[in-house]
Amino acid sequence: MSTIVLSSLHIVLPLLAAPLLPGIINRTKAILAGRRGQPVLQGYFDLLKLVRKGAVYSRTTTWLFRAGPIVNLVTIAMGLLLVPFGGSKALFGFDGDLILFAYLLGLGRFFVVAAALDTGSSFEGMGASREVTFSMLAEPTLFIGLFALSRLSGSMSLSGILYSTGVTGWSVGAPVLVSGAFFMIYLSENARIPVDDPATHLELTMIHEVMVLDHGGPDFALVSYGAALKLWLLGMLLVGVFSPNLAEAPLWFREGYALLGMFVLSVGVGVVESLMARVRLLKVPQLLIGAGALSVLAVILVLE
């Protein structure tokens, strides 16, 4: 199978399978709680129901409110072009693409925050303030962690960084530390426990969900689908960091390993959310600073 065709399949697969990840997380939480829970395919049913509904817009909103979910989804989909999966190269990998990847996530967040502020709601403005505050702590952690892996692998491209550390990198210890830091970013960026609770309905404790309270129908479908796709995108990054060098492995093994990693990561998130409670908002910066400390320690180990 040619590299271009395989890389294209790695873009089509997330677009089709991303809603499975929230279903796996919720199913894991239900099993650990002794409940039957929702079916794994519930995300598809919810998206279909939302698409069939109509959208209602406030007179105070402008084009920014409608553009927020669309731009966020487009930037996340563009990120799929840059992140490799299963040890294969990304479709549009180049030196420095890790910087573009981080700024694509930032651009999508900017439009979601702008859409929340466009409503004029004090609650949504509060959620937007919390979102940008926590992202200000998460983005340096991402950059520092990627720098450590770039130094270790000798590449400035995500295709050269991920799945390339092998035994040598693991002996240094930097990929383990970066994986721990990125896992906290994974929970924070996807509004999961202990940073945020996607199932809460208390506006005073909400972060991401409070920013999309006024979205409904197809717009909320774009928000929900974008959230599921972001779970997959950042999961691709985390699985790639935590994986050994698979360049010499057969194609079926590399693809199966990556898919298994996504499944294990989803189950792991479900376990974390079942065993932990959401921390106080004042404690969230401490968690993100701790993640940043892990990335800095990884850089120190690589530079020694």
Image (spheres, rainbow, N blue to C red):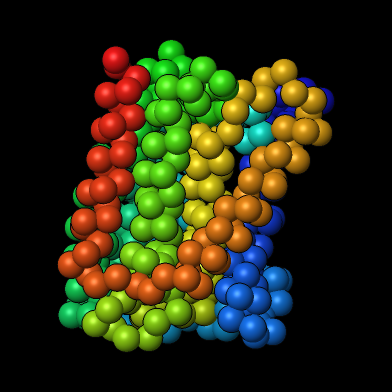
Task: Determine whether 157 is above or below 275 in the image.
Answer: above
Would you say 143 lies left or right of 228 here?
Answer: left
Quadrant assignment for the N terminus? top right
The number of numbered discs placed on residues in the rendered structure image is 0
In the drawing, does residue 193 fall left or right of residue 265?
Answer: left
> In the rendered view, would you say 33 is above or below 70?
below
Q: Residue at x 66, y 80 (%)?
A: 38
In front of the other: 33 or 255: 33
Q: For residue 253, what is the image quadrant?
A: top right
The C terminus - image quarter: top left
- Residue at image coords 28%, 32%: 297
Residue at 50%, 40% (x, y): give it: 237
Front position in the image: 36 or 77: 36
The quadrant holding residue 141 is: top left
Residue 160 shows in this picture = no
Name the quadrant containing residue 133: bottom left
